[in-house]
Image: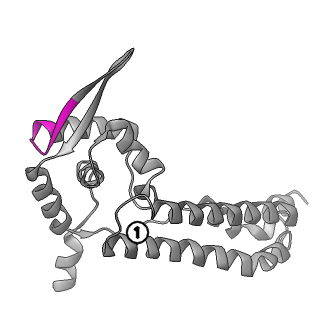
């Protein structure tokens, strides 16, 4: 009974909640909020697309959870800067306590390709793995840089450590198993070539 009840209370953070989370770090424009999801610390564990951020900010403003101030710019449209209100802080705290976070979802084109490594050329598998190794190293450097951009709190430091541990483990696994993946590449005939014979 307890298990089913816990499962029924799982849920994803909505875009309004994650926007409030970004604003908790400081006032920001819609563009700056989007950059937090694309390149900043939230890029590693939260989503916020261009088409969803601005409608969310409009709703948050109407609900009094954020305020919006227009800053005039020379030869450009006014820049709207958003600020989280006390009501917004309360809403954010309540939203984070409302549901147990939903399970992490891992979707990976890399894993899909490597699942079929037996039918692909060793050169291609080597290129794919080497590109991902380089990507993981870049991500780790980026995360270390993100860790210097905001005031350090214990929670932020621990989340950064968690994320870096995940990327480091993935990197270590690919480095350790690169040759094994390459060795199995081309081992099996393609089902299509077998059917043609």
Task: Choose between 192 and 88: the one closer to the eye.
Answer: 88
For the point 23% across and 48% down, the residue is: 16
Above or below for 58 versus 189: above
Q: Position of residue 30 (x, y in %)?
A: 33, 37
Above/below status of 54 relative to 172: above
Above or below: residue 176 compared with residue 64: below
* Residue 67 belongs to the span the image colors magenta: yes
Is 69 located above or below residue 180 in the figure? Answer: above
Residue 3 vs residue 85, the one in the foreground: 85
Which residue is the site of mark 1?
104
Horizontal side of residue 122 vs 23, given as left or right: right
Q: Position of residue 167 (x, y in %)?
A: 56, 71
Where is residue 67? Give x, y as percent.
15, 38
Secondary structure type for disc 1: loop
Q: Which of the image's four quarters has the N terminus?
A: bottom left
Q: Residue at x 63, y 65 (%)?
A: 136
For the record, the magenta segment spans 61-69
Q: How was the colour assigned to the protein in this rendering? A: one colour
Q: Left of 117 or right of it: where is 105?
A: left
Q: Residue 142 vs residue 68: left or right?
A: right
Question: Which quarter of the figure has residue 155?
Answer: bottom left
Outermost top residue = 75
Q: Residue at x 29, y 60 (%)?
A: 12
Tell me the residue at 52%/61% (across/down). 145
| Few, some or many residues within 10 Å of mark 1 (<14, 14–19, 20+) | few
């Amino acid at each position: 009974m307890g298990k089913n009840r816990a499962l029924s209370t799982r849920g994803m953070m909505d875009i309004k909640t994650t926007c409030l989370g970004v604003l908790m770090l400081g006032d920001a424009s819609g563009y700056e909020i989007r950059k937090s999801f694309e390149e900043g610390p939230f890029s590693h564990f939260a989503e916020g697309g261009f088409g969803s951020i601005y409608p969310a900010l409009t709703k948050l403003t109407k609900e009094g959870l954020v305020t919006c101030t227009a800053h005039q710019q020379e030869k450009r449209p006014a820049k709207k800067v958003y600020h989280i209100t006390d009501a917004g802080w309360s809403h954010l705290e309540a939203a984070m306590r409302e549901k147990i976070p939903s399970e992490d979802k891992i979707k990976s084109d890399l894993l899909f390709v490597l699942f079929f490594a037996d039918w692909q050329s060793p050169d291609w598998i080597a290129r794919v793995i080497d590109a991902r190794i380089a990507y993981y190293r870049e991500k780790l450097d980026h995360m270390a840089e993100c860790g210097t951009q905001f005031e350090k709190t214990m929670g932020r430091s621990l989340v950064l450590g968690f994320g870096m541990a995940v990327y480091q483990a993935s990197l270590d696994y690919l480095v350790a198993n690169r040759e094994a993946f390459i060795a199995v590449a081309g081992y099996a005939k393609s089902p299509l070539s077998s059917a043609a014979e």
